[in-house]
Amino acid sequence: MWLKAGRLLQVGAPRMGIVGAGQLARMTHQAAISLGLSVRLLADERTDAAALVASDVTIGSARDERALAAFAAGCDVVTVEHELVDATALERLEGVGMAAIRPSSSVLRTAQDKARQRTLLDRLGLPTPANAVVADAGSVRSFAQDHGWPVVLKSATGGYDGRGVVIAGDDAGAAAAHGRLSRGGSPVLAESFVDLDSEMAVLVARAGKGTTVAWPVVGTVQVDGVCREMVVPCGLSGEVEATARRIGLALAEALDVVGVLAVELFVDRSGIVLVNEIAARPHNSGHWTIEGAITSQFENHVRAVLGWGLGNPSLTAPAVACVNVLGPADGSDPADRLADVLRADPAVKVHLYGKSARPGRKLGHVTALGGDTGAGLTRARAAAQILTGER
């Protein structure tokens, strides 16, 4: 028996639909296959990373209500791999009971909108950089008078991987940045600049009220707004880790998340933990969990959205290091050097996403397990450099 939007159906394994077909959907699909599930994908193009390896693929836009409705009609549960989806359309689908939408349209609205996130965080009393929605360059100037230059300006909606974020150091820079960020109609959020000590993330899986697990806190290294490296343990104090974990669990509960919730966090020079952003889906900062945790973020996301019991998030080794593989500047394809890296370190785990190579594009990641993060990071970096032709 299977429950579809409140109705019991006499079927076999539930059919899960994923809106989006990038590398996150590809890895979620892999986890679902191991559980014997049939997965449908709504892809922009047949060449998307997950669409290349799936058999049940519908081509359509995540912002097209008719495409979403037609897709959901063939699913028992619909989840997402990104926030660039029409939440209003999903809300209507929830209303007619066509399929269970997990996470809900309400959660997705918050994940899509950084200003909405700040409102929630303030209501919960969770720490964030000082922030305000700014209507124009004059509003940015007023904000800077209160909080100092530089000011971080962000598109409240639509930005990801560093896109839609500008650091303005003066009035002229703020005016130019505000004009550019607001051009698409998105509100602009101003935040105080954080003197960073480190960055980290906490990932939580929640299957429903009272059923929640959290992975160990992961330390992250960002370059140009893109996560490049991840290490577990994160190397920060037990108090900082406990604070991060409390924040992640509190947000998952407050939002009533079903699935994986990722919370990106700053630690400033004085040791204060601040929330940066949230994502209600599997996240780049959790790629290490495939080999590094007993149950990966991808498997637990599947289990959560289907209402099944959650798996153990504990580590499989004392330390885990993961390095993302970005397209080399010369445009070459890391896949051409796959045999080289496998010979060089037979124990490193390589994940390539099947995407066409171009400079700076996220094409894969490598993971190394071991006794300490330093040695693991050295191995993972070396493997990534072989793939990109740097060694």
Image: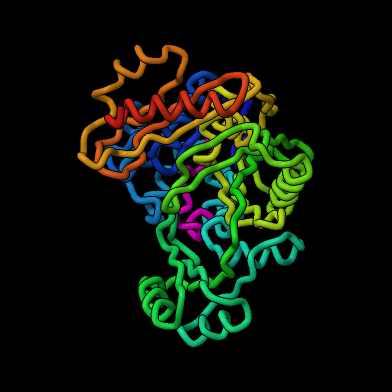
Stretch in magenta: 76-91
What color scheme is it? rainbow
Using the image as rendered, state which of residue 172 and residue 256 is in the foreground. 172
Question: Is 239 left, or right, of 204 in this rendering?
Answer: right
Instruction: State the image coordinates of residue 285 (x, y, percent, origin top left).
Output: 54, 40
Q: Is residue 346 above or below residue 118?
A: above
Quarter of the picture containing the N terminus is top right
The structure residue drawn at horizontal position 41% and vertical position 56%, both measured from the top left corner, is 65
Using the image as rendered, state which of residue 67 and residue 128 is in the foreground. 128
The structure residue drawn at horizontal position 78% and vertical position 44%, both measured from the top left corner, is 239
Q: Is residue 184 above or below residue 206?
A: below
Using the image as rendered, state which of residue 306 and residue 157 is in the foreground. 157
Instruction: State the image coordinates of residue 353 (x, y, percent, origin top left).
Output: 35, 31
Instruction: State the image coordinates of residue 46 (x, y, percent, origin top left).
Output: 27, 37
Q: Is residue 316 above or below residue 109?
A: above
Magenta span has 83? Answer: yes
Quarter of the picture containing the C terminus is top left
Magenta span has 201? Answer: no
Is residue 261 visible to the viewer in this orientation of the structure?
yes
Instruction: State the image coordinates of residue 324 (x, y, percent, origin top left).
Output: 42, 35
The structure residue drawn at horizontal position 38% and vertical position 39%, both measured from the top left corner, is 22
Is residue 12 visible to the viewer in this orientation of the structure?
no
Residue 307 is drawn in which quadrant?
top right
The structure residue drawn at horizontal position 66% and vertical position 56%, both measured from the top left corner, is 269
